[in-house]
Image (tube, rainbow, N blue to C red):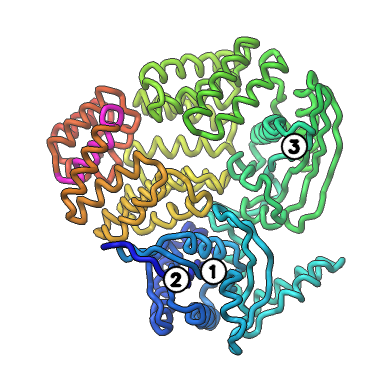
């Protein structure tokens, strides 16, 4: 089908609290999903709209006119409010779009989606162009909300809210927010929500849309990235590193729930309300602050925030020298746990080797580059870790960081897998030998045993040791989930991933793992909202679109799979996905061309993916040949062999089962 361009009004809707509900009550979640369709489809058609597609619990629709889009949105919200079963967020924007294969693409789609994501529950937010088009309509009133910088949108966008019957004007909310008597303001807001939505909706609003637990116990905390207030802005690595050190120290306390780095640092550079952050992360406290480093002098300002109301519970200033950085960090951590009436069990200096500050500084710089996760920056990180070890070879953290970086290079085929994993093994064994109480060393060993050695018992033993040292470490729980997943115990794996989300609710890879565990169980439709959550957190995240497309293919919906594969961000997985979808659509010439492109570009190093392609195409002999090749070459992806839904049609072949036996896997 050729591409066409036209002006259209794009509407996105999203069910408030759906992902959290899915994690708690899947039956109820699917009932709401069906109810949502029953409400929206006829209304969209009534206003001459086109139902484009569902995105998990969201709906995308297009309209020829802005008036039709807004009137449809108003009627949809009225119907939802009358049903009192769930609430929607709705966003609308008008612009030029590209229509291809019954789908719609373009900046207008992205902007509408972003506007929907920031809309308040039960509301309709629209862009300025929509506002201008409807202001002359007597039946539609709008009011300005704010100017917002939307992700992947070049220019700031002015956001307006469509006034619905019975809604409170934003001007009243602004005046209430400025009131000194805040506790009565929040009480009033709570009454309004209850009156409009009913208890069920109100309770859902207390949950994050993550699928993880959001119970705010008093013994829970998130360490947000401290602000870099140094004159030299290149010192950001140091403020990030100090924040992470504090997080790691607190994570050693068994009775304290500590949110992982990925989720805590997700709010870096954002002016988001403390209460909102607390709800999203499911914690009662936030540790925030700033770091100013000038030469060897350091000033740290730390503040403990009550996430329930945003009030400051405690604050303190710390002045010190770089040579005393470890003592300074421990002092801050001790003060924090004293406020929480807990006890810091393990001194921070245990993870600093001889306490060489120059080596420590190089490790922090390495971490800064590693977090970017691309090939060149991981290589830069390896250089910094090696420089740190040249100064202080007794530092277990430097060895563990080096092992992690080299393992990543090996897994991504940036370097030779066998050589890389062996170097990583030696580095992590050195870390454990230097400090057997340093949890990341055991985590790295578990990863190597799982992803490269296929030593399932050894991997579980390493992860369990790490878990005893850091019980609130989401990476350890994810590793244990992967261990169950590899063994084909996908239901048990899903439980570990859900627990990991409690401690790192905004880490995309955990949603990817959870979605794949559900897919392994055959719960393909249920998995898609978790893949969509990844894109909500990070629209550029690799593999999310491909896995959504894969699930649509396995559900017999190649038309819905195609746009997902086309949007995949990582070239190798885009080619992989299009090879599958063109085959499913019967577009043989294009499928064969993509298969040749994939084989020529990636075949030697990505044998397992080629086995998946051939298995899906029904080419059993080729699939088995590439599986054998993957085993011979130690392909890291082979560890998914038992739980991979793309390999279902070759599971009965003796040669497939022979590979499982060689890997110490078997069907129970």
Q: Residues within 10 Å of mark 1 (few under 14, many from 20)?
A: many
Q: Tell me where residue 458 appears, x and y as whole percent.
A: 41, 24
Residue 59, which numbered label?
Answer: none
Rendered position, 49 above or below 319 = below
Q: What residue sits right under mark 1 in the picture?
A: 91
Residue marked by disc 2: 7
SS type, badge 3: strand
> Distance between the Cα atoms at labels 3 and 2?
44 Å
Along the line of sight, the residue nearer the viewer: 188 or 499: 188
Residue at 38 percent of width and 27 percent of height: 413
Q: Nearer the viewer, mark 3 or mark 2?
A: 2
Q: State yes or no: residue 609 in magenta.
A: yes
Where disc 2 sits, the SS reads strand
Q: Residue at x 73, y 39 (%)?
A: 226
The answer to whether 133 is drawn above or below residue 557 in the figure is below
Q: Quadrant of the N terminus?
A: bottom left
Image: magenta residue range: 602-618
Tell me which corner region of the image, top left, top right, bottom left or bottom right, holds residue 97: bottom left
In the image, is 249 to the left or to the right of 619? Answer: right
Q: Is residue 195 above or below residue 93?
A: below
Q: CA distance from mark 2 to mark 1?
A: 17 Å
Return the x and y of residue 422 as percentages of the image width and height.
41, 16
| N-term mark: 3 or 1 | 1
The count of marks equals 3
Q: Residues within 10 Å of mark 2 (few under 14, many from 20)?
A: some
């Amino acid at each position: 089908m050729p591409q066409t361009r036209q002006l259209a009004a794009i509407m996105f809707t999203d069910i408030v609290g759906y992902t959290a509900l899915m994690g708690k009550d899947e039956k109820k979640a699917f009932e709401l999903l069906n109810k949502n369709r029953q409400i929206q489809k006829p209304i969209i058609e009534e206003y001459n709209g086109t139902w484009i597609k569902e995105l998990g619990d969201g709906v995308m629709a297009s309209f020829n006119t802005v008036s039709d889009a807004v009137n449809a949105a108003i009627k949809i919200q009225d119907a939802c409010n009358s049903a009192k079963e769930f609430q929607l967020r709705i966003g609308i924007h008008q612009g030029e779009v590209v229509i291809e294969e019954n789908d719609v693409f373009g900046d207008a789609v992205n902007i509408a989606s972003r506007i929907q994501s920031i809309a308040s529950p039960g509301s309709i937010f629209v862009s300025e162009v929509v506002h201008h088009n409807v202001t002359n309509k007597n039946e539609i009133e709008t009011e300005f909300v704010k100017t917002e910088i939307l992700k992947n949108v070049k220019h700031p966008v002015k956001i307006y809210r469509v006034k619905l019957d019975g809604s409170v004007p934003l001007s009243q909310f602004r005046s209430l927010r400025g009131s000194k008597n805040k506790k009565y303001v929040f009480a009033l807001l709570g009454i309004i929500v209850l009156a409009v939505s009913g208890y069920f909706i109100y309770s859902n609003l207390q949950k994050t849309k993550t699928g993880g637990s959001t119970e705010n116990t008093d013994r829970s905390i998130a360490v947000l990235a401290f602000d870099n207030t140094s004159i030299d802005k290149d010192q950001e690595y140091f403020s990030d590193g100090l924040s992470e050190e504090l997080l790691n120290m607190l994570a050693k306390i068994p009775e304290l729930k500590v949110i992982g780095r990925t989720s805590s640092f997700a709010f870096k550079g954002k002016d988001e309300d403390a209460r909102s952050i607390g709800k999203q992360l499911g914690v009662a406290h936030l540790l925030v602050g700033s770091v100013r480093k000038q030469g060897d002098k350091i000033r740290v300002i730390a503040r403990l925030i009550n996430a329930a109301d945003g009030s400051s519970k405690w604050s303190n200033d710390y002045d010190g020298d770089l040579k005393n950085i470890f003592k300074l960090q421990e002092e801050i951590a001790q003060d924090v746990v004293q406020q929480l009436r807990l006890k810091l069990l393990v001194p921070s200096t245990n993870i600093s080797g001889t306490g060489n500050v120059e080596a420590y500084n190089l490790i922090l710089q390495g971490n800064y580059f590693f977090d970017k996760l691309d090939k060149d920056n991981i290589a830069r990180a390896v250089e910094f870790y090696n420089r740190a070890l040249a100064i202080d070879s007794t530092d277990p953290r430097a060895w563990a960081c080096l092992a992690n970086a080299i393992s990543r290079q090996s897994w991504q085929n940036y370097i030779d897998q066998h050589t890389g994993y062996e170097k990583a093994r030696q580095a992590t064994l050195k870390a454990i030998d230097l400090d057997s109480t340093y949890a990341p060393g055991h985590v790295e060993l578990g990863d190597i045993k799982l992803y490269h050695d296929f030593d399932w018992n050894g991997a579980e033993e390493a992860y369990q040791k790490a878990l005893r040292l850091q019980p609130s470490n989401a990476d350890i729980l994810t590793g244990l989930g992967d261990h169950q997943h590899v063994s084909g115990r996908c239901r048990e794996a899903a439980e570990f991933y859900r627990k990991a989300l409690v401690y790192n609710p905004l880490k995309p890879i955990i949603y990817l793992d959870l979605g794949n565990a559900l897919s392994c169980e055959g719960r393909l439709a249920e998995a898609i909202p978790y893949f969509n959550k990844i894109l909500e957190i990070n629209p550029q995240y690799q593999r999310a679109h491909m896995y959504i497309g894969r699930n649509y293919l396995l559900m017999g919906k190649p038309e819905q799979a195609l746009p997902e594969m086309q949007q995949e961000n990582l070239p190798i997985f885009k080619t992989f996905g299009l090879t599958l979808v063109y085959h499913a659509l019967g577009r043989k010439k294009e499928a064969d061309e993509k298969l040749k492109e994939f084989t020529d570009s990636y075949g030697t190093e990505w044998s397992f993916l080629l086995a998946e392609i051939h298995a899906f195409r029904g080419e059993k002999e080729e699939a088995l040949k590439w599986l054998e090749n993957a085993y011979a070459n130690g392909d890291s992806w082979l560890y998914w062999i038992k739980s991979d839904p793309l390999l279902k049609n070759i599971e009965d072949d003796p040669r497939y089962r022979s590979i499982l036996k060689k890997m110490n896997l078997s069907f129970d």
